[in-house]
């Protein structure tokens, strides 16, 4: 290839990088779809219980916290030398096989429990809808869970591109319904959050403003987290744009996160202002999502039928996205385990093994029905903060390929948020 041809190719890549196309829209919506799930449905309860000022501060920090952390993780994946290398390959390349194995396990353990949690959530949502809205007796829980999980896994079996397209298509009705419900609640807005100080103090357990914000951070980390799909997203952009992928990734992430923060925070504010702190406290005690509480609280047909639909779509989308990450992590663990013993296995056999494992474990956990909030706090939260916030910051400080990002002021912000999230979650666990 001549120098002129190389220059033309680079110019074409930069032009494509600046132009917004259909594929960019699909990825923007897929990132959004992965983030919006059960965590979002519990966010109004946790956020609104502590009063209006913490809620306002949370709205202000939501975008930088979400954008800069996922941008850093995306840059970490892009820093690998291979165009096809996912996050597990990049970890091995930068940190060596031993540390790479540890981080790969952490990556898998950060995502897999959330996949199990969504299995429980979608079963509970469907069961509640059958009983309370359709007034029919649901099948035995194990049968219902098996049907739902098998249905989702059949969609997944057709491949990653179908998953990405499915999530992007599901986003359209989800955003519309979420916004319609948020607007629908406006006539119910009241000033209870400014008046029921005793309930707010009780829910906050006497904590001051800083302590309250400290304890809300882990909920925000989980609610806006979409790290499982970041690896697939970064690899796709690297294959399309090569070394020029960083700017394209940042642009798509920016628009996705703007959309995410505006819609989610409007939904949170609308829910919180339409209920009282005492209502939110009751929802927390009942261990149900805000949508289920709204359906039971207002007794209106619109909310009663729309709320379960929103929950079902949100949880399905997030199940797809988290499956991609869990599968990627487990596949790497299986391959490394076989390699350490001097063995190999055909790729299709490994994929089949992973599918069987995912189906069986998701169905079993959904049938057992453990606490969703407990799974978030104990299993998912701390490791998400390690992978999403602290690992990219450590890589920026130590890895030569990421040296160019060391001067960014956002690094300090992300490091602080990561440490706060981990310490707050452990505080809640050991108190």
Image (cartoon, rainbow, N blue to C red):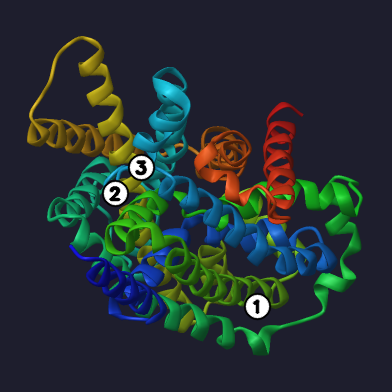
Measure how far apart labels 2 and 3 are at the Cα level: 7 Å
Residue 349 position within the rendered picture, expressed as x and y whole percent measured from the top left: 9, 31
- Name above or below for residue 253 compared with residue 154: below
Q: Which residue is mark 3?
A: 81
Q: Nearer the viewer, residue 129 or 321?
A: 321
Residue positioned 34% across, 75% down in the render:
11
Tag nearer the camera, 1 or 3 = 3
Task: Residue at the far top: name it.
Answer: 341
10 Å neighbourhood of mark 1: few (<14), some, or many (≥20)?
Answer: many
Measure how far apart labels 1 and 3 are at the Cα level: 46 Å
10 Å neighbourhood of mark 3: few (<14), some, or many (≥20)?
Answer: some
Q: In the rendered image, which quarter is residue 32 located in?
A: bottom left
Q: Which residue is mark 1?
A: 270
Q: Which residue is mark 2?
A: 83
**In the rendered view, does 187 fall on the left or right side of 308?**
right
Q: Nearer the viewer, residue 106 or 363?
A: 106
Residue 330 position within the rendered picture, expressed as x and y whole percent measured from the top left: 30, 32
Measure how far apart labels 2 and 1 are at the Cα level: 44 Å
Mark closer to the chain start, 1 or 3: 3
Residue 357 position within the rendered picture, expressed as x and y whole percent measured from the top left: 22, 32
Residue positioned 33% across, 66% down in the render:
135
Q: Nearer the viewer, residue 91 or 330?
A: 91
Mark closer to the chain start, 2 or 1: 2
**In the rendered view, does 289 fall on the left or right side of 50?**
left
Q: In the rendered image, which quarter is residue 177 located in?
A: bottom left
For the N terminus, the image quarter is bottom left
Q: Nearer the viewer, residue 351 or 389?
A: 389
């Amino acid at each position: 290839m001549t120098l002129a041809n190389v220059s033309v190719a680079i110019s074409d890549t930069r032009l494509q990088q600046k132009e917004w196309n259909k594929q960019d829209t699909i990825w923007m919506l897929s990132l959004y779809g992965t983030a919006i799930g059960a965590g979002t449905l519990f966010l109004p309860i946790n956020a609104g219980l502590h009063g209006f000022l913490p809620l306002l501060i949370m709205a202000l920090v939501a975008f930088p916290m979400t954008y800069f952390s996922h941008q850093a993780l995306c840059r970490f994946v892009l820093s690998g030398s291979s165009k096809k290398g996912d996050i597990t390959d990049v970890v091995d390349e930068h940190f060596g096989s031993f540390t790479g194995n540890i981080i790969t396990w952490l990556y898998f353990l950060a995502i897999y429990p959330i996949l199990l949690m969504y299995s429980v959530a979608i079963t509970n949502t469907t069961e509640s809808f059958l009983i309370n809205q359709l007034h029919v007796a649901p099948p035995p829980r194990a049968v219902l869970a098996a049907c739902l999980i098998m249905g989702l896994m059949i969609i997944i079996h057709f491949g990653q591109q179908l998953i990405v397209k499915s999530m992007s298509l599901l986003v359209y009705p989800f955003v519309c319904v979420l916004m319609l419900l948020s607007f629908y609640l406006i006539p119910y807005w009241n000033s209870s959050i400014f008046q029921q100080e005793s309930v707010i103090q009780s829910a906050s357990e006497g904590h001051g403003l800083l302590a309250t914000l400290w304890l809300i951070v882990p909920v925000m980390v989980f609610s806006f987290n979409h790290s499982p799909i970041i690896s697939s997203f970064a690899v796709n952009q690297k294959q399309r744009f090569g070394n020029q992928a960083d700017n394209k990734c940042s642009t798509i992430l920016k628009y996705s996160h703007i959309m995410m923060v505006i819609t989610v925070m409007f939904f949170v504010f609308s829910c919180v202002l339409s209920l009282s702190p005492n209502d939110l406290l009751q929802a927390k005690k009942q261990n149900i999502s805000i949508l289920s509480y709204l359906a039971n609280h207002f007794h209106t047909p619109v909310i009663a039928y729309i709320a379960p639909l929103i929950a079902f779509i949100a949880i399905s989308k997030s199940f797809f996205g988290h499956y991609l990450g869990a599968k990627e992590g487990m596949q790497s663990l299986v391959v490394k385990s076989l390699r350490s013993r001097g063995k190999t296995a055909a790729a299709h056999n490994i994929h089949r093994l992973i599918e069987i494992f995912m189906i069986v474990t998701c169905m079993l956990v959904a049938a057992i029905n453990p606490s969703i909030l407990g799974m978030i706090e104990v299993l998912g939260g701390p490791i998400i903060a390690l992978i999403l916030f602290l690992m990219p910051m450590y890589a920026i400080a130590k890895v030569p390929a990421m040296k160019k990002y060391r001067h960014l002021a956002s690094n300090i912000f992300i490091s602080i948020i990561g440490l706060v999230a981990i310490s707050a979650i452990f505080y809640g666990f050991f108190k």
